[in-house]
Image (cartoon, coloured by chain):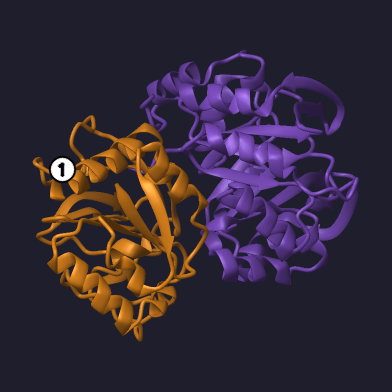
Amino acid sequence: MLAKRLIACLDVRDGCVVKGVNFEGLRSAGDPAALARRYNEEGIDELVVLDVTATLETRRALADTIRQVSKEIFIPLAVGGGIGSLDDARAVVEAGADKVSINTAPLRDPSLITTLAKVYGSQAVVVAIDAKRSDRGYSVYGRSGTTRESRDAVDWAREAESRGAGEILLTSIDRDGTKIGFDCELTAAVSDAVRIPVIASGGAGSPEHFVEVFAAGRADAALAASIFHFSEHAVRELKEFLSGNGVPMRMVW
Amino acid sequence: MNIALVDYGAGNLTSVIKGLRAAGADVRVVSTPDELSDAQALVIPGVGHFSATLALGEDWRGAVRDRLAAGVPFLGICLGMQWLFEGSDEAPDAPGLGLLRGRCFRLPDTIKVPHVGWNTLAVSNTSSRLMAGLPEGAMAYFTHSFAAPTVDATAASTTHAVPFTSVVELGRVFGTQFHPEKSGTTGLRLLANFLAAAREAR
């Protein structure tokens, strides 16, 4: 049976891991390679390195960080942040990324999804969607959650899939960093609308939140950062809890 | 151990190289069939569309068949394993090597496709050399939409709506639908087992 995935996100800025609350007020959480090694040993299923300030400061994800992280792990590694072209994608893939996560760039030029899928395969293309509740459903935001787009999150997920995306990384801006739980309604709406896997992100604060997002949210994977970074819940404990609650998990370390 | 890793343009090889090296291999990336002649083992990786295997034309097929006939161990990963079959519905015009009977098929739409993530290996060949020492219920990392049917050479199968071949083993020919280089300690063990089989074959 296909296991639900737990994904640790390393939000990286200037080579250090940071974690924001509602995308603001970043605080330091350590060395990316050291964290990657720890998570890998604890049994995390996948890692995401996000260069959180890249789009704002028009920087590419740091190839050195990717190389260092990639050396530590033999599990899938996705990298995002400021990837706006095939050349940007090539730089992170050559540094060791298995998947490329794109967010703002395809909102401007959706054909980038297809371009990357043709070169690296759909399995390597993750379209990240930052969504916020509005009076009419969920609005998509670009540029690290600072710019409201005219697109609806569910429609955009469908379009991304049709253009060749292999996975959707769905972040609730309302919940990000709040630790009050994932936005299960948002996650379920997107998960039901597409056939590709949906990774839920934003709001993880307790083990119960993960049970909820896999059940009510129908997520295929759940991503968190601070819940792992500060050892509030070790990966293994979380997996044991989820497994005990009927969520299929990879229990090998 | 001189391992020839075939680069035919189907995806990035960085992770495969890293995994094989971690398992103790001396990896040489080859991009022409002539370079296979002195290889002690062959690895054909590959992600993406089955049509990418069109790059493995008659010259490649001849060279690979020669090596297999000489008893050189072979490992096909993902597309590289599917290529061992007769073909795939994903690209009907691209012939497989035809070493194994059957065609690769699209996983049914009754479930999420692509099949992405960690899934269980149901071992059917308990004397498999490739899976020696793996714990029962071991999981590996998959990412694919098309899959190979189960055949006599199937050493392990995995189910995503329907069962499909996740490991094949026929003499010294091995294949995995999943990505051992992305499958943590399970994958590294499997790569090490392949290298052990390759050493034994020398």
Residue B163 seen in the figure: no
The answer for which chain carries disc 1 is B
Q: Residues within 10 Å of mark 1 (few under 14, many from 20)?
A: some
From the viewer's perspective, tell me whether residue A220 is left or right of residue A162: left
Residue A32 position within the rendered picture, expressed as x and y whole percent measured from the top left: 67, 28
Task: Give the vertical position of A96 relative to B29 (above or below).
Answer: above
From the viewer's perspective, tell me whether residue A81 is left or right of residue B28: right
Shown colour of chain B: orange
Residue B77 position within the rendered picture, expressed as x and y whole percent measured from the top left: 34, 57
Q: For residue A36, which quarter of the picture?
A: top right
Between residues A114 and B109, which one lies in front from this camera angle? A114
Between residues B23 and B181, which one lies in front from this camera angle? B23
Residue A58 position within the rendered picture, expressed as x and y whole percent measured from the top left: 88, 50
Residue A70 position within the rendered picture, expressed as x and y whole percent measured from the top left: 57, 38
From the viewer's perspective, tell me whether residue B168 is left or right of residue A13: left
Q: Single out the residue that lies furthest toward the front.
A: B38
Task: Give the vertical position of A133 relative to A100 (above or below).
Answer: above
Q: Residue at x 25, y 34 (%)?
A: B137
From the viewer's perspective, tell me whether residue A84 is left or right of residue A194: right
Shown in purple, the chain is A
The residue tagged 1 is: B129
Q: For residue B28, which quarter of the picture?
A: bottom left
